Amino acid sequence: MNEIKYYEILDCPHVLEYLFHPRMTAPGRQVGEGRQDMMIPVNLGIELGASLHFKSPDAPVLLFFHGNGEIVQDYDDLGQAFTRWAGVNFFVVDYRGYGDSSGSPSVGAMMADAHRVLDFLGSLMEKKKMTGPVSVMGRSLGSAPALELAASRPGVFCSLIIESGFAFAGPLLRVLGLDPDGLGFQEGQGMGNLDKMGRVRCPCLVIHARSDQLIPFSDGRALFDACPPGKKELVAVEGAGHNDIFIRGMGPYLDGVKRFCKQDSP
C-alpha cells in the first residue's frame, strides 16, 4: 500500500484552496446503459467514486483521471463516446472530496490514491474477466496521477495518454492566482510531471489544444519532448482551448485514443 507523500508547499491549506475545486454529484443522476458506478476504498473511512463504462470483456481498458473542476458524473455521456468510437472499457475515477467521494483533496492523497485505484482496477478486471490491455490517461490536473502511475509502475500499461497536461507546476500556480515566488516554491517541490515523463517506457500520446488559455501548448510540447524515444505522438488540436478541446477535436482525439489503447499488452 502506497503511503501518502506530503508535498510541503502544495498541500498547505492556502494553496489547496486554489489548487482543487471539488463539486458534489448533482441530484437525480440517471442510471446509464452499460455504466456501473462503484466506490473504491483508499483509506480508513475514505472512498472514491468511480464509473466503468463497459464495452466488452476483451476490449482495451482505459483508466482515466479527469481535470480539476470536473467529476465522474460529467463523463456519463462522454463515456459512451469512448466505448463506441474508441472501443475501450472506460474507467473514470474521482479525487477525494469530488463527486460522491469522501475526504478532502490534496496532492499527496491524489498521488497515493492513484496506486490504490490501479490495484482496485486489477481486481475488478479479474472479477469481470476483462482481458484487454490497460492504458492510463490524464486530463489537465489528471496528468499528475497518470504520470505518477506510468513512471512508477513499469510493465503495467500498454500506453500513456496525456491530454492538456502541465509540464511545470510554478506557472500553473500563477495562472490559478498564486505567487510561486512569494510561497517560496521551486519546481522541484512540484508534482514532477516533466521528470516522470522522462521515466515512462510505454508508448505515449500527448493531446493538447493549440490555443489552450490555461495550460499553454508549450507545456504539451515539453512533455512530448521529455518522453523517451520510441512510439510517441503529439496531436495538436487547432481552434480549441482548454475546455472545448474534446468537442472541437473529437475526431483526432478519439482516433488517437483508439490507436494507442489497441496495442499489444506490455
Image (cartoon, helix red, strand yellow):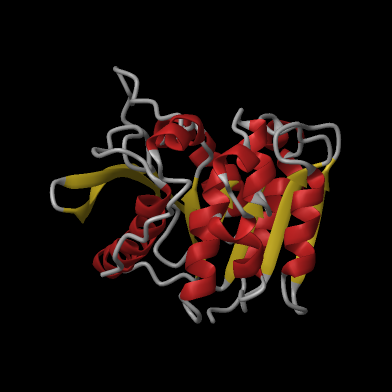
- Residue 262 in sight in this render: no
Taking depth in this image into account, of 120 and 58 the one nearest to the observer is 120
Measuring 71% from the left and 36% from the top, which residue is drawn there? 245
Q: Quadrant of residue 58?
A: bottom left
Compared across the picture, whether 221 is left or right of 174 comes to right
Compared across the picture, whether 175 is left or right of 122 comes to right
Residue 72, percent from left and from top: 41, 37
Taking depth in this image into account, of 163 and 111 the one nearest to the observer is 111
Name the quarter where the C terminus is drawn: bottom right
Measuring 61% from the left and 54% from the top, which residue is drawn there? 186
Measuring 73% from the left and 77% from the top, which residue is drawn there? 228
Q: Quadrant of residue 81?
A: top right
Residue farthest left in this picture: 45
Residue 126, percent from left and from top: 28, 70
- Residue 130 in sight in this render: yes
Measuring 67% from the left and 37% from the top, which residue is drawn there? 246
Compared across the picture, whether 156 is left or right of 137 comes to left
Placement of 82 over or under 19, stated as above or below = below
Q: How many marks?
A: 0
Name the quarter where the N terminus is drawn: bottom left
Q: Quadrant of residue 233?
A: bottom right
Residue 240, percent from left and from top: 79, 32
